[in-house]
Image (tube, rainbow, N blue to C red):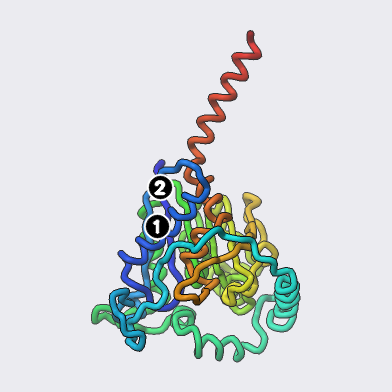
Amino acid sequence: MAKVIIGIHGLGNKPSKEVLQKWWKESMIEGLTNTDQNFKFPEFELIYWADLLYEKPLDEKIKDKKHLLYLSEKYVPSKGVNKVVNHDLRKKILDWYDKTADKIFLNEDMTINYSFIPDTIIHNYFKDLEAYYLNNTITSNGTIILARDEIRNRVTDVLKKYQNDDIFLIAHSMGSIVAFDILKFSLPKLKISTFATMGSPLGIPFVRSKIALEKKLVLNDSHKLKTPRGVKKWYNFSDLEDVVAINYSLQDDFNENKSGVKAVDFIVNNDYEIDNEKNPHKSFGYLRTPEFSNVLLDFIQKKEKRFIQKILDLFRILKQKK
């Protein structure tokens, strides 16, 4: 069984798949290199869906900042050591918000109150998410298709391709919504060795309400949301300054699956910065955080560790027999 890393990017237009995949890989390798451990980077494929919603990709070669395809946030290496940032006060505020938002916006049956508020925000600021949830018709290569269906089809096809491999699935931002939906509704039996979400909006009441509604309609299931049953490990990485991950903790929002797996939350410092502008939501910064790198390294070395452990156990048995 081969190891494979699969990534799903988030909302907004992107550079080409080839460029974005290269930068994701460089970000992960940067983080792994900082662990001072030996590693062999597995096969990596980025599931790219920006081209379904945007006619042309952002172009890193364009210098005019006013150009519609100007790319302002390229991959750049970290400026230094990733430091732990103390956000005790911010954490308390976010914890209060999390509890208060649930009480205000969510009913016991997971239906949403004041839906016009998130609907207005999404319509004005998150067009990709609106297209996904409304399953809007879009034109791709001259063909009229449904946005959500086509995004899910693209993700499903790639995951099926690697269904017999050991999968480390990384989902950033809106990509975590798509990934969760796929693992819940489209490929519930697919085994995911490690599921990593970063900068995820999955904890936001509106998003959980959407998942619960589909679960009720498709599966006739009104129980509390759970970790997808095929997931063996789930790690969630959030920077407390990342506004998309304002509900930074997922472990209380999703019950454990039948295997006892639920989200393990990590508060991290996303140190992405370019031209003196920070972006705590950027995928490149998340992919090189020490916390994520250690989880990824554990996945890469898992088989090797088991082999070494067997050798040690064998030596222990032989020593006892002497």
Above or below residue 234? Residue 207 is below
Which residue appears farthest toward the top when viewing the image?
A: 322
> Helix, strand, or loop for circle 1?
helix
- Quadrant containing the N terminus is top left
Expressed as whole percent of the image width and height from the top left, the position of residue 280 reads: 55, 71
The quadrant in which residue 93 appears is: bottom right
Expressed as whole percent of the image width and height from the top left, the position of residue 303 reads: 49, 37
> Helix, strand, or loop for circle 2?
loop
Q: Residue at x 50, y 65 (%)?
A: 285
In the picture of the structure, the residue carrying the numbered disc 1 is: 25
Mark with earlier residue (2, 1)? 1
Q: Residue at x 51, y 47 (%)?
A: 297
Question: Dots 2 and 1: beta carbons under 8 Å?
Answer: yes
Any part of residue 109 in sight:
yes
Instruction: Using residue 103 as the reference point, say whether residue 44 is left or right of it.
Output: left
The quadrant in which residue 18 appears is: bottom left
In the picture of the structure, the residue carrying the numbered disc 2 is: 41
Q: CA distance from mark 2 to mark 1?
A: 9 Å
Expressed as whole percent of the image width and height from the top left, the position of residue 75 reads: 41, 67
Q: Residue at x 43, y 61 (%)?
A: 7
Query: What type is the residue that disc 1 sits on?
Result: Lys
